[in-house]
Amino acid sequence: MPSNVPPAFTDLLSSATRSAVHLEMRDSYAVDYEQGPFAEWRKGFRHDPADRASWWRPWLDLVQEAVSRGVVIRRARIVSEPVSEYTRFLYDGTFTNIAAGEQVRWLPRRRASDIALPGNDFWLFDDRVVRWNHFTGGGASAGGEVCDDPAAAKLCAEAFEAVWVRAIPHDQYEIH
């Protein structure tokens, strides 16, 4: 059943025992064009992979901890090509996710046309608990929703695997 007050994301990932998969299907998410990481990136700032202390953050600790417990974390991004400026920003920072232990792949949207996809981005934990990520039309978060309905979990698992098989590993994907 859906819950109006979802468990904290950190609790969901901390309780995962085998897998956590994340499907992202938007070309941009709400960002502040005036300040913050995206604005800094637009002005030319790039993280130095050799200066881990400058880019490591609590999210990466959480991922690394889960991976160290044996949880396989995979992220797939369906993107339009040519990619949006925001997708370029994500691409440039993805090395941090990989450093923490995530596996990341990219699927050009035109190669996803015949895949049955859920209507929202999601996380799926241990093939049984879905955390839907809802967004406004402008890309701002509209909150999350947790669902343990077996049919929804099956839909998400099948959609993610279909995307994953077709998607290109991060180190092989070339931005267009």
Image (cartoon, rainbow, N blue to C red):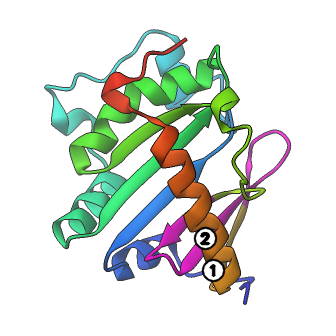
10 Å crowding of disc 1: few (<14), some (14-19), many (20+): some
Per the image, the residue denoted by label 2 is 131
Residue at horizontal 75%, vertical 42%?
139
- Gap between marks 2 and 1 measured at Cα: 8 Å
Residue at horizontal 31%, vertical 26%?
171
Query: Is 136 part of what is drawn in magenta?
Result: yes
Percent coordinates x, y for residue 143 in the rendering: 71, 64
**Does 119 sit left or right of 48 as displayed?**
right
Between residue 30 and residue 123, name the one nearer to us. 123
Percent coordinates x, y for residue 31 in the rendering: 65, 34
Residue at horizontal 31%, vertical 80%?
17
User: As shown in the figure, which amino acid type bears the numbered disc 1?
Assistant: Pro
Percent coordinates x, y for residue 25 in the rendering: 66, 43
Q: Quadrant of residue 145?
A: bottom right
Instruction: Find out whether the residues at labels 2 and 1 contact each other: C-beta distance under 8 Å.
Output: yes
**Does 79 sit left or right of 40 as displayed?**
right
- Quadrant where the C terminus is found in the figure: top right
Q: How many marks?
A: 2
Q: Which mark is residue 6?
A: 1
Q: For the view shown, which residue lies furthest in the right direction?
A: 137
Query: Is 72 part of what is drawn in magenta?
Result: no
Name above or below for residue 58 compared with residue 17: above
User: As shown in the figure, which amino acid type bears the numbered disc 2?
Assistant: Arg
Nearer the observer, disc 2 or disc 1?
Answer: 2
10 Å crowding of disc 2: few (<14), some (14-19), many (20+): many
Q: Quadrant of residue 98?
A: top left
Residue at horizontal 47%, vertical 73%?
125
By secondary structure, the bulk of the magenta-drawn segment is best described as strand
Q: Which residues are magenta?
A: 122-142
> First in sequence: mark 2 or mark 1?
1
Secondary structure category for the residue under label 1: loop
